[in-house]
Image (cartoon, rainbow, N blue to C red):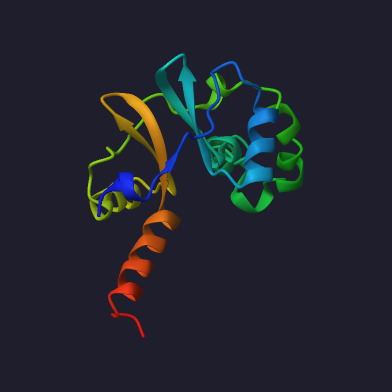
Amino acid sequence: MQVKQIMSGSPKTVTPETGLLEVVSLMCLYRYSGLPVMEGEKMVGFIAEKDVLHKLFPTLEDMMSEGLGSVDFDEMMGKYRQVVNLQVKDLMTPNVITVTPDEHILKAATTMVRHKFRRIPVADAGRLVGMLSLGDIHKALFQANISAGLCK
């Protein structure tokens, strides 16, 4: 089974200049775990929930100097307001890993698991054509096995 058979087409995208407040609103309202970042037709990055939340984590220096037990996590939660006032370009991952539409779904799943992705862009000759999630893959495997009578 190929990625193109189960991917979501026409994914929601953002630009590097999109405000993070808009992005986190989309993530929370529509349960997007990540969004491709586009400049025109070119994918220039990816912004994921973990990119946003990572800005709230204590730094290694904080943990070394204060110890994890003395980090004020409630104070760190207050930094969220500062984070959502940034733009996508401030936090996005610039070198995007993609899968192709003709790739086998288990090969795509291997790439996703190896990189700890829940969602990955699907690109054909460098052009964004869809998104694939681990949930899409799992659902396809389940349905294929139910229809083949393998799961009872």
Left or right, residue 67 beside residue 29: left
Find residue 12 and report its horizontal and vertical position in percent: 54, 33
- The furthest residue to the bottom: 152
Residue placed most toward the observer, 73 or 86: 86
Identify the residue at image location x=49%, y=35%: 11
Specify the quadrant that holds the C terminus: bottom left
Residue 41 higher or lower than 142, as above or below: above
**Looking at the image, which residue is at 23% across and 44% down?**
103
Spot the residue most to the front. 147
Q: Is residue 95 above or below residue 33?
A: above
- Which of 23/53 is in front? 23
Task: Describe residue 58's horizontal placement relative to residue 73 as left or right.
Answer: left
**The N terminus appears in which quarter of the rendering?**
bottom left
Q: Position of residue 143 (x, y in %)?
A: 37, 68
Q: How many marks?
A: 0
Report whether 14 appears left or right of 72. left
Image coordinates of residue 113 in percent, x first then y, are 34, 52
* Residue 22, above or below 133: above
At x 47% / y 20%, what residue is drawn? 38
- Residue 23 position by quadrant: top right
Q: Residue at x 57, y 43 (%)?
A: 32
In percent of width and height, residue 94 lies at 41, 24
